[in-house]
């Protein structure tokens, strides 16, 4: 059922929309973000101004934006999806051409006061675009090769651009996020089987390419793979980070070493302790109880989103919600898997907890659309 | 485009089915994460906790404070002083060369020193602190501390360093401490970890070396928390070490100082023993060197100067140096003869200036001869022929046995480096050493302390003490450790007939106090300190027949290193012996002229417990003595020093 079929009169209007927001989701997001404030306060050595305060300010703005976006009718988002996707694509091209070099990779674009990271925006725009595409596409054509090729191209263009920067983590997120939306839309499982097979083949090829003239990854990326497979092979070099992260995590034990008592973070053994590795500080200081609680909060967020999606009869809303929730899921699963040594080190922050304005703002805007879908569901 | 109601239903069903599949897959992933978390944090928490503590908790050693050395009156003769210094650790420094370059703006450092430092840093392990400079001035030290942020890896610290307040006075006996070298470590089995601390000092030679185990003390430990850069964040716990023991030596700083100055620039040695308990009151080797130079790391120029000095200032002549004792050995020969019953107090030999034995002529120092000589006169006049005759009668083995009983040719157990045993030769010894049979001429030479006989100044002092007391006086250097006095030794009787000892003592008295005594000019005129002694002049070359025909060459005409050694042994007071003194002046010339006055002056200082009254000296010498004392820079005697010196 498309929005034209809605009994528009049945959707809540004006300020009453606030009653129809997905409030559990709001509280869960706030709870996760609070864990982040606490940890940012801790890793700053008890200084609130270093990271915690700016993070709180951005979160407040982001929450307001989320609720505001939740008030915007869902059909508006569908209407701008193609434009949003094209705009992000243009920005990605722009970054490739004039972007700022940061951390050895071209990721930023400087727009005066704002330093924009189009690859972050693209994660949401791609979900938006694919949800709109499948909402538009006739259900019977979903698994038709031609109509499968279209979203594949839609996914691969930004993925390729991000890989150029180079940012392996984000490009994998785009690939997986897009794939999940396609999966949820009902694309035949055979395609996924084929892609997984191809992926395995590609990984094999990539590993084989090492040291040859057609090497497909940078040396540092290969080294990260080595390090992932055996962190102890280079305990003071690339493996240092992951070894120290695991020590911090494991030493937390059941109840942790106490707030601000984590030696690994406090004494700077942990790398990037306020961003990608912040989870290890939580695990070190609050132990299994703390780390498990955060995992539970994340699970509940994804669960509430999925429930909202599955009970929503609007296809665009469902797919958008699933896409956002899955992207969110990918963020924390990859980050936690990385610090626990289950995945190689890819630069993926812990959503809502790691220090970083852009990522949090974009994530909260995406949840704003999820709220919009929740509020404006067909009744 | 409108969609049929069926579409909508299908769509919802498909999305729901796929959504549930997706949810299940995500739940599986979350489950895996949770399981991994549980495994790491619950099952393996202890291992990770250990690794975490290993990261951040380091055990640092607290170097123990080295024990002090006191003289017998409590004066510190080896102490500790604050030493401001700085160390650098390569790991924390990062760009070592840059840090050194910055450092050189704060601390005076030559290009060579800087290059040497860089080399040392590169050789040591990255986490071992290397000393940048010892004995920094307070200004340098504080400027390093102030500029710490620009000097990563540089640690200013204030440690205790050994200092010898009496300078060179005790250089030979106490030795000195120095940095532990890799060579030192390689010689040790299971070395104390504290020795690996940068610039830790340990005893290299002398008492410092021999008493190292009790002087070093025990290291304490500090558990500290360090950050990833190795910087110390806080101290978690501290276990204090134990300071090394304070050792009170038998030495008397005032007497030692006097002896050193009295020996002056001669290449000489003097030993003073308290005959009642074996306490070594002074043991001086000259010329001296400043042991503080070695503590701070002696410059190669200074070291070369010491090594090339022909008076060998670094050698400890008191215990390492062995000399033909010359006529000071005659007491041993005399007592051997008396003890064997082959001569007695009334025995008389005729000296006509030489004795011909086995076709060889053995000369007396007096070419004209001494006529009839009895035992007392033999010492008084130091007649050689008397001893040739005695040796011929007694044989070398009994002489050597007596020498050993008197403490020569045996080792004395003292905490000093390379204590020489000397040689009291006998037939077996010569056979072992040279594979040749002993001949009677060897006995004759040995009887007057020449030939194979060698003794150290310490042994000569011990011999004198034993003759003076008739007891087996054993020298000792340590009086008390940490306030606990060493047991007062009870010396065994030597088993020499008192009448025989009396003959020897009367002979030594006659040397000093009879009109024909060889050392009469060095006598003490104060009756309560009446002194007995024996001169010795030992040849360091053979006098050829041709030389003898030309007449004895005067020592002054010879190059320094071919002149005779001058020796003198003595004790006082004659009636109740208290101190025995031996003096050896290498290539000094005649014992009576050179060694005897030195020995007398040192003995008098010991007896008087300070600068002696001029009335104790023979009349004509007082002005000269007074002038000499005025020119000495003597240290003030300790308050109550006289009291502690008297017998308890």
Image (spheres, helix red, strand yellow):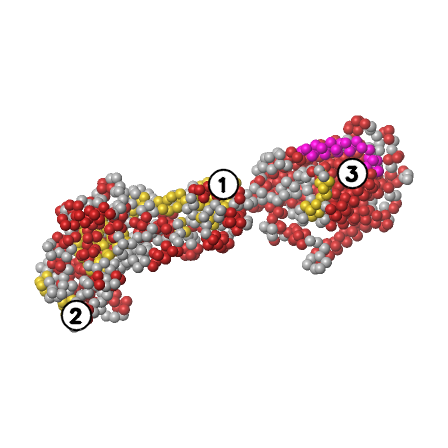
In the rendered structure, which segment of residues is drawn in magenta? A56-79
Q: Which mark is residue B80?
A: none
Q: Which residue is mark 1?
A: B146
The image position of residue B120, as x and y in percent, is 48, 54
For label 1, the crowd category at 10 Å Cα-Cα, with few meaning under 14, some 14 to 19 and many 20 or more, is few
- For marks 3 and 1, give the CA distance: 59 Å
- Give the structural element (helix, strand or loop) at label 1: helix
Mark 2 sits on what residue? B549
Residue under label 3, please give it: A321
Magenta-colored segment: predominant secondary structure:
helix
Q: Nearer the viewer, mark 3 or mark 1?
A: 1
Q: Is residue B390 visible to us here? A: no
Judge whether A22 appears above or below B506 on screen: above
Q: Are marks 2 and 3 on the same chain?
A: no
Judge from the rendering whether residue A68 lies leftward or rightward of residue B11; answer left or right.
left
Q: Chain of mark 1?
A: B
Count residues near mark 2 (Cα–Cα under 10 Å), then give few for <14, some for 14-19, many for 20+.
Answer: few
Q: Are marks 3 and 1 on the same chain?
A: no
């Amino acid at each position: 059922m498309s929005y034209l079929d809605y009994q528009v009169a049945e959707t809540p209007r004006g300020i009453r929309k606030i009653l129809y927001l997905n409030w559990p989701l709001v509280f869960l997001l706030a709870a996760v973000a609070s864990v982040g404030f606490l940890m940012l306060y801790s890793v700053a050595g008890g200084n609130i101004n270093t990271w915690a305060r700016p993070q709180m300010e951005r979160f407040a703005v982001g929450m307001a934006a989320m609720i505001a976006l939740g008030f915007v009718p869902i059909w508006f988002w569908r209407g701008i999806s193609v434009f949003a996707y094209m705009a992000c694509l243009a920005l990605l091209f722009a970054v490739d051409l004039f972007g700022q070099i940061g951390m050895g990779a071209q990721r930023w674009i400087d727009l005066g006061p704002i330093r924009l990271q189009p690859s972050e925006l693209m994660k949401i725009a791609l979900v938006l675009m694919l949800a709109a595409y499948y909402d538009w596409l006739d259900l019977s054509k979903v698994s038709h090769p031609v109509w499968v090729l279209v979203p594949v191209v839609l996914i691969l263009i930004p993925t390729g651009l991000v890989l150029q920067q180079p940012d392996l983590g984000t490009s994998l997120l785009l690939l997986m996020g897009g794939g999940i939306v396609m999966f949820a839309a009902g694309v035949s499982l055979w395609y996924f089987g084929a892609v997984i097979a191809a992926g395995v083949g590609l990984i094999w090829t990539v590993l084989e390419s090492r040291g040859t003239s057609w090497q497909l990854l940078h040396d540092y990326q290969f080294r990260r793979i080595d390090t992932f497979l055996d962190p102890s092979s280079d305990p003071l070099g690339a493996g240092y980070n992951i070894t120290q992260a695991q020590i911090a995590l494991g030493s937390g034990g059941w109840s942790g070493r106490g707030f601000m008592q984590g030696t690994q973070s406090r004494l700077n053994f942990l790398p990037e302790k306020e961003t990608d590795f912040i989870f290890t500080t939580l695990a070190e200081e609050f132990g299994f109880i703390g780390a498990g609680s955060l995992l539970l909060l994340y699970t509940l967020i994804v669960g509430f989103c999925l429930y909202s999606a599955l009970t929503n009869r609007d296809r665009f809303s469902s797919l958008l919600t699933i896409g956002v929730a899955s992207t969110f899921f990918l963020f924390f699963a990859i980050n936690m898997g990385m610090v626990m040594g289950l995945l190689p080190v890819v630069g993926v922050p812990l959503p809502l907890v790691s220090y970083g304005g852009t990522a949090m703002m974009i994530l909260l805007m995406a949840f704003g659309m999820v709220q919009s879908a929740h509020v404006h569901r067909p009744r | 485009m409108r969609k049929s109601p069926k579409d909508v239903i299908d769509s919802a069903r498909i999305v729901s089915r796929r959504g549930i599949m997706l949810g299940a897959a995500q739940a599986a992933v979350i489950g895996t994460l949770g399981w991994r978390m549980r495994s790491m944090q619950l099952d393996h928490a202890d291992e990770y906790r250990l690794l975490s503590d290993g990261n951040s908790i380091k055990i640092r050693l607290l170097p123990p404070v080295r024990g002090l050395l006191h003289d017998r009156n409590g004066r510190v003769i080896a102490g500790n002083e604050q030493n401001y210094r700085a160390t650098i650790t390569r790991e924390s420094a990062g760009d070592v060369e840059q840090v050194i370059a910055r450092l050189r703006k704060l601390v005076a450092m030559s290009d060579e020193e800087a290059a040497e430092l860089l080399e040392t840093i590169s050789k040591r392990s990255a986490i071992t602190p290397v000393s940048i400079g010892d004995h920094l001035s307070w200004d340098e030290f504080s400027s390093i501390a102030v500029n710490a942020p620009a000097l990563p890896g540089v640690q200013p610290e204030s440690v205790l360093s050994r200092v010898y307040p009496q300078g060179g006075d005790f250089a030979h006996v106490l030795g000195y401490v120095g940095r532990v070298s890799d060579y030192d470590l390689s010689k040790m089995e299971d070395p104390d970890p504290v020795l690996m601390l940068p610039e830790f000092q340990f005893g290299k030679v002398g008492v410092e070396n021999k008493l190292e185990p009790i002087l070093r003390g025990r290291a304490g430990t500090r558990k500290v928390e360090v950050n990833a850069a190795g910087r110390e964040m806080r101290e978690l716990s501290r276990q204090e070490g134990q300071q090394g023991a304070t050792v009170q030596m038998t030495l008397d700083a005032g007497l030692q100082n006097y002896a050193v100055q009295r020996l002056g620039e001669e290449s000489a040695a003097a030993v003073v023993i308290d005959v009642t308990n074996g306490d070594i009151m002074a043991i001086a080797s000259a010329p001296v060197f400043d042991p503080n130079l070695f503590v701070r790391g002696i410059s190669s120029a200074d070291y070369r100067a010491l090594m090339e000095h022909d008076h060998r200032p670094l050698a400890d002549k008191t215990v390492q140096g062995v000399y033909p004792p010359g006529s000071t050995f005659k007491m041993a020969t005399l007592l051997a003869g008396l003890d064997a019953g082959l001569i007695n107090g009334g025995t008389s030999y005729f000296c006509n200036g030489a004795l011909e034995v086995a076709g060889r002529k053995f000369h007396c120092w007096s070419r004209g001869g001494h006529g009839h000589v009895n035992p007392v006169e033999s010492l008084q006049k130091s007649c050689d022929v008397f001893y040739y005759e005695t040796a011929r009668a007694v044989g070398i083995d009994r002489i050597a046995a007596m020498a050993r009983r008197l403490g020569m040719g045996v080792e004395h157990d003292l905490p000093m480096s390379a204590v020489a045993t000397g040689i009291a030769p006998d037939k077996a010894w010569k056979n072992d050493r040279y594979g040749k049979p002993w001949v009677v001429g060897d006995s004759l030479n040995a009887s007057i302390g020449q030939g194979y006989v060698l003794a150290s100044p310490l042994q000569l002092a011990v011999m004198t003490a034993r003759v003076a007391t008739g007891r087996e006086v054993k020298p000792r250097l340590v009086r008390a450790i940490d306030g606990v006095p060493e047991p007062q030794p009870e010396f065994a009787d030597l088993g020499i007939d008192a009448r025989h000892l009396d003959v020897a003592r009367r002979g030594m008295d006659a040397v000093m106090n009879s009109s024909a005594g060889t050392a009469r000019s060095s006598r003490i005129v104060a009756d309560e300190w009446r002194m007995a002694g024996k001169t010795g002049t030992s040849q360091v070359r053979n006098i050829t027949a041709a030389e003898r025909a030309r007449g004895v060459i005067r020592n002054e005409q010879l190059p320094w290193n071919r002149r005779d050694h001058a020796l003198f042994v003595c004790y006082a007071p004659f009636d109740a012996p208290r101190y025995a003194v031996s003096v050896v002046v290498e290539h000094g010339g005649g014992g009576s002229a050179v060694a005897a006055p030195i020995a007398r002056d040192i003995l008098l200082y010991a007896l008087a417990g300070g600068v002696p009254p001029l009335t104790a000296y023979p009349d004509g010498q007082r002005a000269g003595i007074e002038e000499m004392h005025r020119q000495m820079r003597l240290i003030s005697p300790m308050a109550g020093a006289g009291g502690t010196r008297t017998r308890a």
